[in-house]
Amino acid sequence: MDYEKLTQVMRRLSLEAGDKIMEIYGRDDFDVKSKSDDSPVTAADEAADRIISDGLRAAFPDVLLVTEEQADTHGTTGDTFLIVDPLDGTKEFIHRRGDFTVNIALVEGGVPTRGVVYAPAKNRVFFTLATGKSVEETGELAKDKVGQTKEISVSKPDNTALMVVASKSHRDQATDDYIAKYSVKDMKSAGSSLKFCLVATGEADIYPRVGRTMEWDTAAGHAVLKGAGGDVIRFDDHTPLTYGKEDYANPFFIAYAPGVDLKKT
C-alpha cells in the first residue's frame, strides 16, 4: 500500500464529502428514511458515500472496499480492506447537533492502521500520516494541499481524576455503572467517532462503549487513536478489538490512553 497516496486521497475525499454533507445540512428540510435495521439514513449519507466510494475505487481499484451504505459490499472481507462510514452520527445530523463525522479507514491484518475522521460542522479533521502517526489539521482545510498540522498524543492519565467521554445519543445505565468504577474528574458527552479523537488528543482519558456498533463506525477513530498512542480493547476480556468479522458487528469496547487503570466488568 502506498500510504502517502492513501493519506492524500482519504483526506481529500473526506473534505469533499464534508462539503456535500454541510450543503444538505444547511437546507431547511431534508428527507430521512429508515434502513432495514430501523436506523436513519439521509440524502447526506448517500451523497457522501458516492463521493468517497467512487474516489476510493478509482484510486485503489485492487483494494476491497466495505462501506456502510452499500449492502453489496458487505459479506466479504480480506486481510486488507478499506472501510467507510460516510456520515457517522446521523441522529446528530438530523437533530442539527453538529457531532457527526466522515470516516475512512484502512484495515490490515485485523487492525485499523490508517484513517481519517472529519467533523465538518466543527471544522476539525484528524488523520494518520503515511508513518502511522496521527495529526490534527488546522486552518482553511484546502483540498489540494495539507495545511498546518500538529501531532496529537493521548494524555498521561491521573487515575484519581480521570476525564471520561461517553456517547451523547446512546448513554445508558450500563455505561454509567461502568464509569462509576473510576475516580472521575469530569465527563464529556460527544457523538459519533469524535469520542475516539477526544481520547487521541488528550481531551479525555477513556471512552467506554456498552452498546452496539459496527466496524465502519469505529475503524477510522480507532486508527487515529492508535496513531496517537492509545488503544481499543474488548469490554469483556480486554483483548484487542479486531476487524474483518463476518457480520462487521463489534463487541462492547473500551478506548483509552495507556496508564488508565482499567476496571473489569
Image: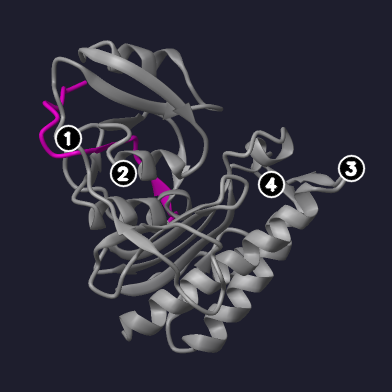
- Does the CB distance between marks 1 and 3 fall below 8 Å? no
Check disc 3: other Cα within 10 Å, few if <14, some if 14-19, many if 20+: few
- Does the CB distance between marks 3 and 4 fall below 8 Å? no
Q: Amino acid at mark 1?
A: Asp
Residue 97: percent from the left, percent from the top?
Answer: 65, 33
Mark closest to the chain's N terminus, 1 or 3: 3
* Left or right: 243 as drawn, with respect to 46: left
* Left or right: 179 as drawn, with respect to 22: left
Instruction: Tell me the residue at 55%/83% (across/down).
Output: 57
Assign the magenta stretch its main secondary structure: loop
Residue at the outermost right position = 28
Distance (Cα) linking label 3 and label 4: 26 Å
What is the quadrant of the N terminus in the image? Answer: bottom left
- Above or below, 219 against 179 in this view is below
Write down the residue under mark 4.
36
- Above or below, 164 against 44 in this view is above
Write down the residue under mark 2.
201
Range shown magenta: 247-265
Write down the residue under mark 1.
237
Mark closest to the chain's N terminus, 2 or 3: 3
Q: Which of pointers 2 and 3 indicates the residue nearer the eye?
A: 2
